[in-house]
Image (cartoon, grey):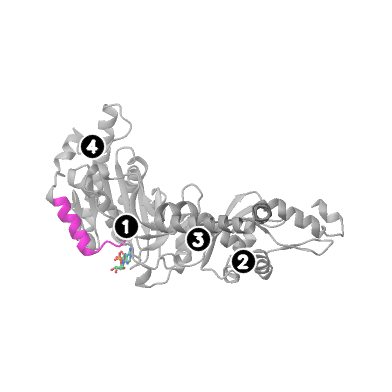
Amino acid sequence: MGREFSKRARGAEMKAAAWVGRHPGSVLAPSVVTASGLELGWATTGGIVGGTVAGLGAWYRAHPDTFDRLAAPRLRSWRRRWWTYVGLRWRNALIACDLFTTHRKTGELRVPRLVRVRSYSPSVDTLYVKLHPGQHLRQFEAKLPELTEALKVERIALERVKPRVIALVVERAEPFTEVIEAPEMPQDADAVELGRLSVGENEYGGDWRIPVLGQHLFAAGATGAGKNSIPAAVLRGLAPMIRDGSVRLWLCDPKQMEFAKLAPIAYRYAAEEQACADLIDEYVDDMQATQQALSGQGKRAITPSPVTPLNLLVLDEMGALLAYGDPSVGRGLRRQLALIGSQGRASGHSMLGLVQEPTKDTVPVRDLFTNRICLRVTSAAHVDMVLGENARLRGALADEIPNDPATAGIGYVIRQRSRVPMRVRAAYVTDTELDELVTFVREGWKGTPANLQVVAG
Ligand SMILES: Nc1ncnc2c1ncn2[C@@H]1O[C@H](COP(=O)(O)OP(=O)(O)OP(=O)(O)O)[C@@H](O)[C@H]1O
């Protein structure tokens, strides 16, 4: 703020020097080429530059995996920085959206500076922006629609990185234009990655993975949003463990639609309201018996095996169970789910709950779930109800996903470390693939109710 004592703006040559200091590469690269041209001759220099380009081309063609992982993000970031978001375009967009401050004495417009551009995937850029004193993330939040149009992109999410530095996560285009194929079923229990089951793809082009052991999952989405894909993909990932009895599936299926197919591989299956309540009571008894068995053996957590299995309680349409039926049953269920949510992790009792509308009846239990997924919802308020405060402001625009079958399975999760929403798409498990899962499990089926007695005993 001290600079505002003077009526004189900073000299252009000083600004240029500061710019060079901030972008040494942009000065160094042309200088090195020029020096090489003068020292080694232009033909040699041309050969070196051409050789480098040809080498990159060969890498691109020969090793797509390493090129896409190592070289592509850097090259793309560089191109975006010096082409897409280059000085004047950036400046004009921010001025058009009133996202600048004015020097009180000189009247100079001070536009927040772009300090870094990262382009982790072809469809998403992260822009690190240095704010001027007097600016705040809130101003960007208020101008998000305008900024999205000015930069000609699909959507923007915001994050505060550190004092006076924010990140704009820019989705340039819809990353999911194709249906994602169902994950392969591992053949052996050893190949199951309980901590990172693949359920689809993320907007960065990588696998979208979710942990199951010691976790509770919650997926919200309007009718037709593609919620069923999530348990279906999870169960395919767990298939050999279900077959071997190391994972037991407890299924509450009030709608009796898609999940009825899975009844033959469920350890317990219920559809009617009271039957679901009884199933959940039994689940809680099983959890408490396991807790006692664990403490008797001086253990703190289970390692999934046929003797101490991982139990997965899948609750389809939680609204029907908690809100739309008999209120006394709903109250009892909420109490039981709270017990499972708070105590089930060590004993290997996980939940996967699906809900169409995250209303006040289902939201109180939402906080019991450690991993939450928001597919297409019908109201902006639902997004924060599912993903937490300000998730929508940060770009989880789940209510703006078009109600179109072509978008089924698309939604948002919150990345644990950075708290940034990430767009994901669940893989689509067809009816045939569900049948394949059932056949696979039934063929070597060892999951019998005897497991319960061993644990409880
Ligand atoms: N991951 C996906 N990718 C592409 N299309 C999908 C996906 N999941 C579902 N679909 C398509 O969308 C339709 C609706 O999906 P689904 O039945 O899973 O929705 P839902 O959210 O469970 O709806 P409801 O709550 O009404 O059961 C499916 O019949 C399928 O055609």
**Nearer the observer, disc 3 or disc 4?**
3
Q: Nearer the viewer, residue 439 or 84?
A: 84
| Residue 35, x across and y down, in percent | 68, 53
Examine the structure image and report whether residue 251 is included in the region drawn in magenta: no
Question: Of the residues under marks 1 and 4, which one precedes in the sequence?
Answer: 1
Mark 3 and mark 4: span between their CA atoms?
Answer: 43 Å
Q: The disc labelled 2 sits on which kind of residue?
A: Lys
Q: Please give the label number shown on residue 124.
A: 3
Q: Nearer the viewer, residue 314 or 196?
A: 196
Mark 2 and mark 3: span between their CA atoms?
Answer: 19 Å
Disc 1: which residue: 230
Question: Of the residues under marks 3 and 1, which one precedes in the sequence?
Answer: 3
Examine the structure image and report whether residue 431 is included in the region drawn in magenta: yes
Q: Dot 1 lies on which element? A: helix
Mark 2 and mark 1: span between their CA atoms?
Answer: 34 Å
Q: The disc labelled 4 sits on which kind of residue?
A: Thr
At 66% from the left edge and 66% from the top edge, which residue is drawn? 94
As drawn, is 90 to the left or to the right of 355?
Answer: right
Q: Please give the label number shown on residue 308.
A: 4
Question: Of the residues under marks 2 and 3, which one precedes in the sequence?
Answer: 3
Mark 3–mark 1 CB contact (< 8 Å):
no
Callout 4: 10 Å neighbours few (<14), some, many (20+)?
many
Question: Of the residues under marks 4 and 2, which one precedes in the sequence?
Answer: 2
